[in-house]
Amino acid sequence: MNDTHQGKIAVVGIGNLLLTDDGIGIHALRELEARYRFPGHVDLLDGGTMGLDLLPFLEGKDRILFLDAVSFGKAPGTIGELNNGEIPGFFATKLSVHQIALPDLLGAGRLLGTLPERMCLIGIEPESIESGYGLSPTLGEQLEGYLTAVLERLAEWGVHPSAVEYENDERCRSMKAPTT
């Protein structure tokens, strides 16, 4: 589905870097920041564990893309996507390890009328959310696939970041943004 759009877009990484895979949203956001330059209408936001404090940063956005660890009940490293109303706004089913903060944020934003109709959560099933810095081996291996899923969604929204070229960094040179 190609849905080109030039309104204001926020890409929001959510997570706690001190709880291994819980920090996947932040790790992914940092990789995107290091590897790409985004158009001026796209903001990359480190939401960490801010919860409701994120609301002012999301006001006025036309679309929001959340990056987070999500419990889909599948194998660790499984990547999934929830769109608009599929993103939990209540506590009925605990999908994200930030279930307490994200529904509160979405509920408050909807009540205030400050959230856009178009939102997407790209999640990845965590292997571990124990204390510790860094990703589990499974999520470390899946990081490239996760970033590809994020870039593909952004491409569907008409966002095509330019790759940052680093003379001595093969990792950054080899990652290319998908085009539609």
Image: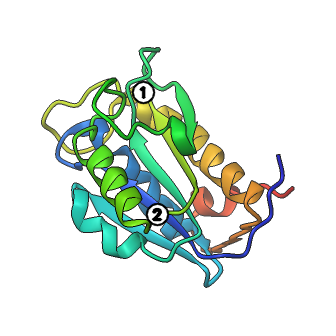
Disc 1 versus disc 2: distance between alpha carbons? 26 Å
Residue 66 versus residue 75 in the image, above or below: below
Residue 81 in the image: state x and y as whole percent: 57, 36
Residue 133 in the image: state x and y as whole percent: 21, 45
Q: Earlier in the sequence, mark 1 or mark 2?
A: 2
Viewer-proximal residue, 59 or 43? Answer: 59
Q: Residue at x 47, y 37 (%)?
A: 123
Pointer 2 residue: 115
User: Callout 1: 10 Å neighbours few (<14), some, many (20+)?
Assistant: many
User: Callout 2: 10 Å neighbours few (<14), some, many (20+)?
Assistant: many
| Horizontal arrangement in the rendering, residue 33 relative to residue 89 (left or right) | right
Q: Residue at x 23, y 60 (%)?
A: 52
Q: Amino acid at mark 2?
A: Leu
Q: Residue at x 41, y 57 (%)?
A: 110
Viewer-proximal residue, 36 or 11? Answer: 11
Residue 167 in the image: state x and y as whole percent: 62, 74
Residue 145 in the image: state x and y as whole percent: 60, 38
Q: Quadrant of residue 175?
A: bottom right
Report the disc number at residue 54: none
What's the coloring here?
A: rainbow
| Residue 40 can be seen in this image | yes
Residue 115 versus residue 61 in the image, above or below: above
Report the disc number at residue 125: 1
Count of marks placed on residues: 2
| Residue 26 can be seen in this image | no
